[in-house]
Amino acid sequence: MMKPAARKPNINVLLRKYHKQISIVTLFPMTLLAITGTIIPIVDNMGLADATNFMIKLHTGKLFGLDTFYSIACGLALIGLLVTGVALTGLLPKSRAKSAISNGVED
């Protein structure tokens, strides 16, 4: 018997898959960034210099010795989530070739 031909996966299924994977992997670092970024000005206004320095080290990843990698990884993850999220919303226009084919017009 012949094997059935593999179907081409839908782009939305792939985007949803990648968006989910990126969000699961970056859940803790992004949550840590949001919480520490919110707490730093509060602690700073209270005049707690030691606590402020600790929070800044935690926020930037210097506490773990990952300052350069941490910043780049979080930035790239945020861009990936933004791109896949916007593409999934349907706000981006469909490609011209695809819309031309659906309208029955060829180049």
Image (cartoon, rainbow, N blue to C red):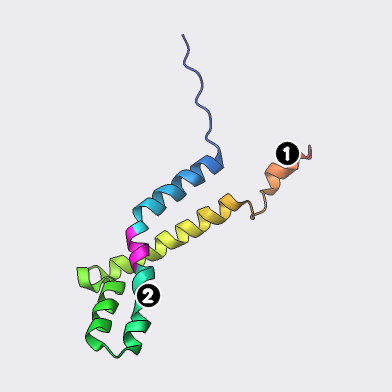
Q: What mark, if any, has residue 101 been given in the picture?
A: 1
Residue 49 image offset from top left, x and y in percent: 25, 88
Residue 68 image offset from top left, x and y in percent: 29, 70
Whether the magenta-drawn stretch holds residue 31 is answered as yes
Query: Outermost residue, bottom direction?
Result: 47
Q: Residues within 10 Å of mark 2 (few under 14, many from 20)?
A: some
Q: Measured along the vertical axis of the image, is residue 4 above or below residue 31?
A: above
Q: Nearer the viewer, residue 28 or 83?
A: 28
Query: In which quarter of the view is residue 30 placed?
Result: bottom left
Which residue lies under the disc numbered 2?
37
Residue at image coords 53%, 28%: 7
Query: Outermost residue, front direction?
Result: 46
Q: Nearer the viewer, residue 23 or 8?
A: 23
Residue at image coords 69%, 44%: 97
Residue 84 image offset from top left, x and y in percent: 51, 53
Residue at image coords 70%, 48%: 96
Residue 1 is left or right of residue 25, and the answer is right
Q: Magenta part of the protein: which range?
A: 28-32
The CA distance from mark 1 to mark 2 is: 48 Å
Q: Measured along the vertical axis of the image, is residue 2 above or below residue 70?
A: above
Q: Are marks 1 and 2 in contact (CB under 8 Å)?
A: no
The amino acid beneath tag 1 is: Ile
The amino acid beneath tag 2 is: Gly
**Label 1's element?**
helix
